[in-house]
Image (cartoon, grey):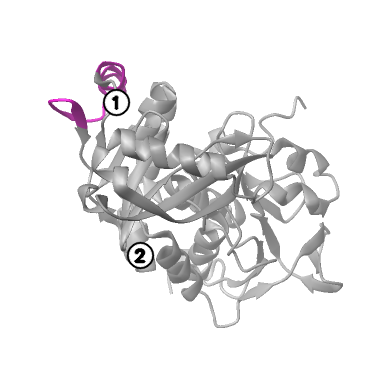
Amino acid sequence: MSDRRARLAGIRIIVVGAGVLGLATAEALVRRGAVVQVIDPDLGAGNASAAAAGMIAPAMEAALEDCGVERAALYRSAAAQWPAFAQGAEIDLLVEGADWLGPCDPLAARLQAYGFPFERKDDRLHIPGEARVVVGAALARLAAALAEGAVIAGRVERIDAGSSGPVVTAGGERLEADAVVLAAGWSAGAVRVEGLEGLGRLVTPVKGQIIALDGEGTAAVQRMTRGPGVYLLPCPGGVIAGATMEPGRQDLEVDPAVVEQLRAAAAALVPALEGATVQRAWAGVRGAAPDGLPLAGATRAPGVFSALAPRRNGWLLAPLVADVVVAAITGEASPPEAEAFRPDRFDPA
């Protein structure tokens, strides 16, 4: 057993939330010998990670956000962790590259400024190295890495920090732990943690609606394809088209008008999809911090750590967030990006 693994051997850790940040952190903790229990009200089925596209696309995200050199480098570092992370968790990482079919000049200029390679092909840009995962299968693999029965259904009402370790109250039951990771997504504010009331209030909901198309023309989408206002991804039997960004909304209702907007945007981007039909539509709610980066690491409450609010980049940032949280728990040297994720970075104190 390595020193790193021995440091967490037998340590009891509760992770509140079964989205990709919670499960990635849980998997990393288990690999270091911790005894991990994950608590989620619907076992992750209703969270934003399950409703997402699973894109590991640092170049496209950086260029579309026009985020600046520093954040682009952070996205690049996060993506660089994915091959080893995917191999360790037995997740299929599909490295297919991505195509951009909108106006090329602005995006090309940003990609060049941020140091991402790209190829210009007639009316499109091709960005090699961009990747994706199949979200349902990936979440299942992360959950399978834990002990049998370690992911349980339950709603956490409060976390009490104390000198002997935090206590989690879920469904009236009190669970003791050596550490707790709050990874409850946009609803983190509903979990009462004394001294951390402001942390939950920092996380705002951002609803996203997404559709799946099948039938005529779907074979024309062979890889991640993006354009103004829409992305397309191949999926078994069809194409996924998404996703809206609706700040302040926390409902999961599907709006028929939005479904039609996404269908029309998909057909405008790839005309072969004009005859495709909407096979299903769904929604998820992301959590977002004011600057769009996660709240990850140690909090002011003893024994309580957070892995929250990655906005729309939860899948991209998950392995990096897991490393930041694990380093905070073990006291090991933190990744350089940990400073940008500090949960208290908005606290004037």
- Residue 60 position in % (x across, y down): 34, 33
Can the viewer see residue 114 in this picture?
A: yes
Residue at (29, 26) in percent of width and height: 102
- Mark 2 and mark 1 lie on one chain; the one further toward the N terminus is 2
* Residue 257 falls in image quadrant: top right
Q: Which residues are magenta?
A: 105-125
Measuring 52% from the left and 58% from the top, which residue is drawn there? 50
Residue 325 spot, x, y in % from top left: 57, 51
Q: Which residue is mark 1?
A: 102
Q: Quadrant of residue 111?
A: top left
Count of numbered marks? 2
Question: Residue 36: x percent and y percent?
Answer: 60, 71
In which quadrant will I find the N terminus? bottom left
In the displayed structure, 344 sits above or below 24; it is above
Tell whether position 247 is magenta: no
Quadrant location of the C terminus in the rendered image:
top right
Q: Quadrant of residue 123 in the image?
A: top left
Q: Position of residue 263 (x, y in %)?
A: 41, 42
Mark 1, secondary structure of its residue: loop
Q: Determine which residue is flagged by label 2.
A: 91
- Residue 245 against residue 5 in the figure, above or below: above
Q: Residue furthest left?
A: 122
Q: Is residue 311 visible?
A: no
User: Against 114, is 259 above or below?
Assistant: below
